[in-house]
Amino acid sequence: MTTPLKKSKICIEKLSFDIAGKISLKFEDGRVIIVPLKYFPDIQKLPVEKRKKYTIVDDRTVLFSHSESVYHLEDFMGLESKWRER
């Protein structure tokens, strides 16, 4: 008998900008995704020091102190249409 897979909530733990032109998202379960900043022009325009001033809200939403844009986990994963349809 097989046990059904447990769905776990993906939670953003932290962001980093250690790779030029990329944003890295580390999740609480240890996984990391790396995405080109070119898809996020508002973040790309921020100087590196200002990029580091962000807040993670509800484990899935990122707000930057020096930007009015709001980013959801789905934006970084290329699934923004899923949350925009709500």
Image (cartoon, rainbow, N blue to C red):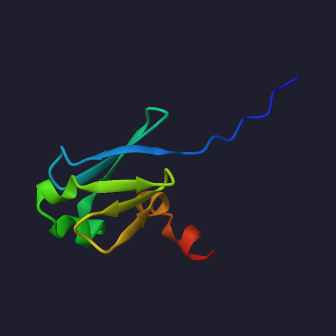
34 left or right of 18? right
Q: Position of residue 14 (x, y in %)?
A: 35, 44
Which picture quadrant has residue 78? bottom left
Split into 4 quadrants, where in the image is the N terminus?
top right
Q: Position of residue 6 (x, y in %)?
A: 71, 36
Residue plotted at (30% across, 67% down): 39
Q: Is residue 40 above or below residue 26?
A: below
Q: Is residue 19 above or below residue 30?
A: below
Q: Residue furthest top?
A: 1
41 left or right of 14? left
Q: Position of residue 21 (x, y in %)?
A: 18, 56
Q: Residue furthest right?
A: 1
Which picture quadrant has residue 3? top right
Residue plotted at (18% across, 46% down): 19
Q: Is residue 9 above or below residue 81?
A: above
Q: Position of residue 18 (x, y in %)?
A: 18, 43
Q: How many marks?
A: 0
Nearest the viewer among 84 and 62 is 62
Which picture quadrant has residue 8? top right
Q: Is residue 1 above or below residue 58?
A: above
Residue plotted at (63% across, 74% down): 86
